[in-house]
Image (cartoon, rainbow, N blue to C red):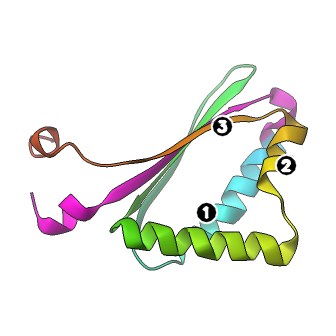
Amino acid sequence: MSNQAENAVYRVDRFTVPEAALAVFLARVEQTNRLLALQPGHRLQRVLTRAGNPHQVVTVIEWADAAALTAAKRVVEQHYAETGFDAAAFMQQLGIHADMGVFHDVPAVAAHAV
């Protein structure tokens, strides 16, 4: 595996979203993802859904390394502060639950990926 791939980090966020909140939530995800896509070190971005009530929404963003992820997080926090957006209040008001984390490749498994 290349050193570049070994340094990659993945921000994976899973949300449980009530049907009534799905459209407004996805609009916010799209807005945030547009900003993230402009940041240095951004490599890949996916938004996945599983229908139901509530819906499951998973966002996956690959970053070149932890420093790129940290820098992008600062940009988003600054943008939210400038626009008066409170992500925690937004999710609480809409009844959205989140499980968020940073993940890394498992080298032995990634080396055999197709």
Q: Which residue is mark 3?
A: 98
Q: Is 66 included in the stretch rendered in magenta?
A: no
Secondary-structure class at tag 1: helix
Kindly check if marks 3 and 2 are in contact, taking CB atoms under 8 A apart as contact. no
Question: Which residue is depicted at the point 10% across and 46% down?
Answer: 111
Is 100 situated left or right of 51 in this image? left
Q: Which is closer to the viewer, label 3 or label 1?
A: 3
Q: Position of residue 30 (x, y in %)?
A: 68, 58
Residue type at mark 3 is Ala
Span of residues in magenta: 1-22
> Hey, which residue is sitting farthest top in the picture?
53
Question: In which quadrant of the rendered image does the C terminus lie?
Answer: top left
Does 88 appear above or below 50? below
Question: Which residue is depicted at the point 90% across and 40% down?
Answer: 93
- State how far apart marks 3 and 2 are (Cα): 12 Å
- The image quadrant of residue 62 is bottom left
- The image quadrant of residue 31 is bottom right
Q: Earlier in the sequence, mark 1 or mark 2?
A: 1
Q: Position of residue 52 (x, y in %)?
A: 69, 20
Question: Which residue is depicted at the point 14% across and 67% down?
Answer: 3
- The image quadrant of residue 87 is bottom right
Residue type at mark 2 is Phe
Q: Position of residue 77 (x, y in %)?
A: 69, 69
Secondary-structure class at tag 2: helix
Q: Is residue 42 visible?
A: no
Kindly check if marks 1 and 2 are in contact, taking CB atoms under 8 A apart as contact. no
Tell me, for residue 82, which label it has, or none. none
Q: Earlier in the sequence, mark 3 or mark 1?
A: 1
Q: Which residue is mark 2?
A: 90
Secondary-structure class at tag 3: strand
Q: Is 17 included in the stretch rendered in magenta?
A: yes
Q: Which residue is mark 1?
A: 33
